């Protein structure tokens, strides 16, 4: 057993040669291809292919469909077995429940818990899209400055991604690098990225850059106007979110006050009732 343990540790610690398909997938910015064809997640993805999956949100978050399916099934099983300990506790306490109660509660909780990964993915993707659009507005301004300095469309798209940091610019840089190595036009990669992650503004930027070859410096005003409209839309969303949170504050305060009153009044009411 000791020898087997040492063998396992050495085998895991020793660097293995990288797989070519995994390296190419990492350069392309797509999930690991081995996860799509093997493992429990791949089996679930094939069997549950008809179920709705937020693919745009998962692509933006960098989560594979197989991993999402595993999360959904895990939450479903957790919801199904959650009433079992409570039923056992009631049995030990001398208050046995009919088998239909934990079974029905398990089905309901299983369905509700299975929706948790969807809700989490959509919520996180909504926040990420907000960050993406904010960074994209800055990227548009920098592309416009590069065009004003006389740079061509490919150079104007590549230069801001090289000097900026952050996960948004990292994705843009990876797409542009892949397009350069594949001998494709960079705006095609940006359009594909915009369609994959659900950012139509990025696809519009790709269309503007594609038209820049024929229209020359006339796209400067278009880029600046697009950046300004994106900032205005982001400011409007921020104000709407702030107003909604402000309107929700009385509800939270009312619930807190009600709980405090119940806590204070319960001993006196209990003493009167008893």
Image (cartoon, rainbow, N blue to C red):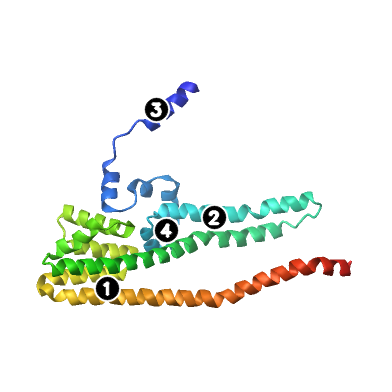
Q: Nearer the viewer, mark 4 or mark 3?
A: 3
Label 2 belongs to which residue?
75
Label 4 belongs to which residue?
49
Secondary element at tag 4: loop
Secondary element at tag 3: helix
Label 3 belongs to which residue?
10
Tell me how far mark 4 sits from mark 2, CA to CA. 18 Å
Tell me how far mark 3 sits from mark 2, CA to CA. 35 Å
Between 222 and 80, which is closer to the camera in this rendering?
222
Secondary element at tag 2: helix
Q: Nearer the viewer, mark 1 or mark 3?
A: 1
The answer to whether the residue labelled 1 contacts the one labelled 4, judged by CB atoms less than 8 Å apart, is no
Q: Position of residue 100 (x, y in %)?
A: 70, 59
Q: Is residue 46 visible?
A: no
Tell me how far mark 1 sits from mark 3, CA to CA. 53 Å
Q: Tell me the number on the disc at residue 84.
A: none
Q: Position of residue 156 (x, y in %)?
A: 17, 64
Between 190 and 104, which is closer to the camera in this rendering?
190
The answer to whether the residue labelled 4 contacts the one labelled 3, judged by CB atoms less than 8 Å apart, is no
Mark 4 residue crowding within 10 angstroms, few (<14) / some (14–19) / many (20+): few
Between 52 and 216, which is closer to the camera in this rendering?
216
The answer to which of marks 1 and 4 sits earlier in the sequence is 4
Mark 3 residue crowding within 10 angstroms, few (<14) / some (14–19) / many (20+): few
The answer to which of marks 4 and 3 sits earlier in the sequence is 3
| Horizontal relation, residue 55 to residue 169: left or right | right
Secondary element at tag 1: helix
Mark 1 residue crowding within 10 angstroms, few (<14) / some (14–19) / many (20+): many
Q: Residue at x 37, y 65 (%)?
A: 131
The answer to which of marks 3 and 2 sits earlier in the sequence is 3
Q: Residue at x 22, y 68 (%)?
A: 206
Label 1 belongs to which residue?
227
């Amino acid at each position: 057993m000791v020898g087997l343990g040492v063998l396992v540790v050495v085998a895991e610690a020793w660097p293995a040669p990288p797989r070519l398909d995994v390296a190419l997938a990492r350069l392309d910015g797509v999930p690991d291809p081995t996860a799509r064809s093997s493992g429990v997640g791949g089996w679930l993805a094939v069997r549950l292919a008809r179920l709705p999956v937020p693919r745009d949100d998962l692509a933006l978050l960098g989560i594979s469909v197989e991993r999402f399916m595993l999360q959904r099934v895990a939450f479903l099983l957790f919801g199904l077995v959650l009433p079992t300990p409570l039923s056992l506790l009631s049995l030990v306490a001398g208050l046995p429940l009919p088998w239909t109660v934990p079974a029905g509660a398990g089905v309901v909780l299983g369905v509700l818990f299975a929706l948790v990964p969807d809700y989490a993915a959509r919520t996180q993707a909504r926040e990420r899209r907000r960050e993406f659009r904010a960074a994209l507005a800055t990227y548009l301004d920098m592309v416009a400055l590069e065009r004003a300095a006389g740079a061509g469309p490919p150079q104007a798209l590549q230069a801001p991604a090289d000097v900026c940091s952050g996960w948004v610019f990292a994705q843009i840089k990876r797409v542009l690098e892949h397009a350069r190595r594949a001998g494709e036009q960079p705006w095609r990669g940006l359009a594909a990225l915009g369609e994959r992650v659900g950012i139509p503004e990025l696809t519009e930027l790709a269309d503007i850059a594609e038209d820049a070859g024929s229209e020359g410096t006339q796209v400067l005003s278009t880029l600046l106007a697009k950046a300004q409209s994106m900032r205005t839309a982001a400011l409007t969303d921020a104000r709407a979110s702030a107003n909604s949170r402000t309107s929700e504050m009385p509800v939270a305060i009312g619930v807190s006050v009600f709980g405090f009153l119940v806590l204070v009044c319960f001993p006196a009411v209990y003493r009167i009732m008893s």
